[in-house]
Amino acid sequence: MARPRRNVKFQHRGSNSGSANGRRDSFSDISEGGSEPGSPTSKGKGEAGNNEGEQTPGSEYEKKKQTFITRTIWTFLMIGFFFAALFAGHIYILAIVTAIQIISFKEVIAIANVPSRARRLRFTKSLNWYFLATTMYYLYGESVIYYFKHIVLVDKVLLPFATHHRFISFILYIIGFVFFVASLQKGHYRFQFTQFAWTHMALYLIVVQAHFVMNNIFEGMIWFFLPVALVITNDIFAYICGITFGRTQLIKISPKKTVEGFVGAWFMTLLFGIGLTHVMTRYKYFICPVNDLGANFFSGLECTPNAVFVPRTYNLPAWNPFFQGRTVDIAPIQFHILAFATFASLIAPFGGFFASGLKRTFKIKDFGESIPGHGGITDRMDCQFIMGFFSFMYYQSFIAVYKTSVGGVIETAITGLTFEEQMEVVKGLSKYLYNQGAVSEELLSCVSDGITKR
């Protein structure tokens, strides 16, 4: 009787089911030997599928041509859709950013390896989405309360949610945390804690950073569109300058990036930023903070522009005889745009390098297939998240003007005064407005009588 052979692997039909179940193979699903050129597995596949694997030059050209056409069509579709939303109003841009948050989170979570024996664990995906919903509830609530205090704090139903928003958010997170601990199962601890950490990393790198992008929209459309345009412009010119005169490799994680392309793109992004800023500052729709979510480009917005958009007169340096006695009018935003363009050119690309390293770790080409010809949403947004975060921090630190607002006064009165003190404030304001001729004597009497009867 023949002796049974050991260490012999048989190829089953289900061996390539990694893509059939909706999940791409990650680094732990693919054996190291299977990726080596001389391994038995790769050799066997090469011999068995020799006719299927070989591609003629003509078929390769047709494939690249079709990919280029698809990529070009979807590029113009995305550009058209983006500008349509931009001119339609802030609410549509907010909806796009929200969709990007959710899809990007889904793509990043999906690349994590799920062992076959752990796929039967209950609540793993449910907890991921629960933590996403809790985080978005907290962040969106913070923005709504901050920018729309004058609406939220005077509503009888919304007032309790607004005043206790952070505690409610904390309780929601604690419920998810307790549920996670209660769902731990023996033999799956490493996988479950890895998923927990991976989910929180995705929440921070995607959802939290995208939240600051939304705050930029509330502060004025220019603080959203300008950083986005600078990153796109830098990416385009980095490619053009790189293929034109690029020689020196910039970073190993992305071999096609060159120092020449990096520096050339920086210079071109500076010029583009100065020109785009000059055009956008002419329209209040771009520079005014949001005070009406129903506004669009054609209806416009009204506000007192931030001083950073008002041109100032500067004396040219006197050391040059040609400049002596001459002046120039420049809006301060043109100086700030140098910092924005520099960050978009020298720092934001490292968000893309980080994403490239992450994809190499899991041996995938793209984060997903959300956009035909482009890969996933995350592949297109990897630099935008960190750029939006920087824009918010820079704006709040160097540009924002902090002054008393209607919402701030209402918040102070509601949270810091008793009912009797609030009524005194109402009476005092009514009398002041009457003395200024802003309200009639009948209204003053009505307010005074109503408060007295109470």
Image: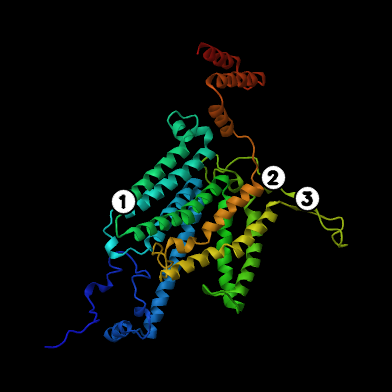
Quadrant housing the N terminus: bottom left
Q: Residue beneath label 2, please?
A: 307
Work out how far the residue at label 2 is from the one at label 3, CA to CA, in angstroms.
13 Å
Q: Nearer the viewer, residue 263 or 47?
A: 47
CA separation in Å, label 3 and label 1: 66 Å
Percent position of residue 441, x then y: 60, 15
Assign a secondary structure to mark 2: helix
Task: Determine the secondary structure under disc 1.
Answer: loop
Tag 2 near tag 1, CB within 8 Å: no
Tally the numbered discs: 3
Name of the residue lying farthest toward the left: 1
Badge 2 or badge 1: first in the primary sequence: 1
Closer to the chain start, of discs 2 and 3, is 2
Looking at the rendered image, the disc whose residue lies closer to the viewer, 2 or 3, is 2
Residue 346's image quarter? bottom right
Which one is in front, 434 or 2?
2
Q: Is residue 293 visible?
A: no
In the figure, 238 relative to 440: above or below?
below
Check disc 3 and give the amino acid type. Thr
Q: Which residue is mark 3?
A: 313
Residue at 37% x, 77% y: name it. 32
Q: Is residue 206 left or right of residue 262?
A: left
| Residue 183: mark in rendering | 1
Q: Nearer the viewer, mark 2 or mark 1?
A: 1
Provide residue 39's location: percent of width, then percent of height. 34, 84
- Name which of mark 3 and mark 1 comes first in the sequence: 1
For the residue marked with disc 2, what is the amino acid? Ala
- Residue drawn at x 29%, y 87% as measured from the top left: 47
Dot 3 alpha-carbon crowd within 10 angstroms: few under 14, some 14 to 19, many 20 or more: few
